Image (cartoon, coloured by chain):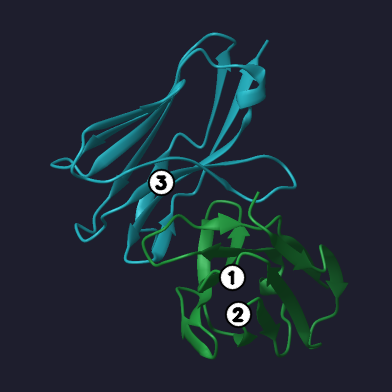
Chain colours: A green, B cyan
Amino acid sequence: DAGITQSPRHKVTETGTPVTLRCHQTENHRYMYWYRQDPGHGLRLIHYSYGVKDTDKGEVSDGYSVSRSKTEDFLLTLESATSSQTSVYFCAISETNIQPQHFGDGTRLSIL
Amino acid sequence: QQQVKQSPQSLIVQKGGISIINCAYENTAFDYFPWYQQFPGKGPALLIAIRPDVSEKKEGRFTISFNKSAKQFSLHIMDSQPGDSATYFCAASNDYKLSFGAGTTVTVRA
């Protein structure tokens, strides 16, 4: 299994609070991604990174920001969480832009 | 809107039977078509993938059929086993951005 650790694995928080999810990899892969998974939608790309400090928006980036200060860590931040952001969040990594993506085991986030 | 349409939403198959999941896409720039398998509480895991220059790829009991002119591709699971019970996602990629189908939950009855 690809060395991907997501933390926390579960979180419950209240509307309006800031939330940060962490993805840590031990594979030294250049590309990292954040997805959200919702019933009926599959997985949708939120943001991705193609190197340290190099990030870009995905399909559903509104309300989310990311940072990557080291190769191994990719952080996803909800500045002011809303109930519509209740979801399961997955991090993925890939060695190059044409290599398969490998996923972590997800963070289940509930916003009340 | 979803760039990759997947059907059916769920299916039940008897042990030893064949499971078939279909996907369709519109963006002709897609050049990589992976299938992922996901078990409850786990992340999706790459199962098998195909590029549009081939019409079929087989790995063990799993086969992808690809029809470029129809912009459709499908996953066949032969001799389905209870351990195959999972959710399956098709996806399509242009460069490194994956677009996923909505998923199919497969239940294999013993």
The label nearer to you, 2 versus 3, is 2
> How far apart in space, not on screen, are marks 2 and 1 (Cα)?
6 Å
Q: 10 Å neighbourhood of mark 2: few (<14), some, or many (≥20)?
A: many
The three-letter amino acid code for the residue at tag 3 is Pro
Q: Are marks 1 and 3 in contact (CB under 8 Å)?
A: no
The three-letter amino acid code for the residue at tag 1 is Asn
- Which residue is disc 1 drawn over? A28
The three-letter amino acid code for the residue at tag 2 is Thr
For this rendering, which residue is in front, B27 or A67?
Answer: A67
Give the residue displayed 61% in from the left and 64% down from the top.
A27
Q: Are marks 2 and 1 in contact (CB under 8 Å)?
A: yes
Work out whether mark 2 precedes mark 1 in sequence or the reverse, and give the earlier one. 1
Screen quadrant of the C terminus of chain B: top right
> How far apart in space, not on screen, are marks 1 and 3 (Cα)?
23 Å
- Which residue is disc 2 drawn over? A71
Give the residue displayed 64% in from the left and 85% down from the top.
A70
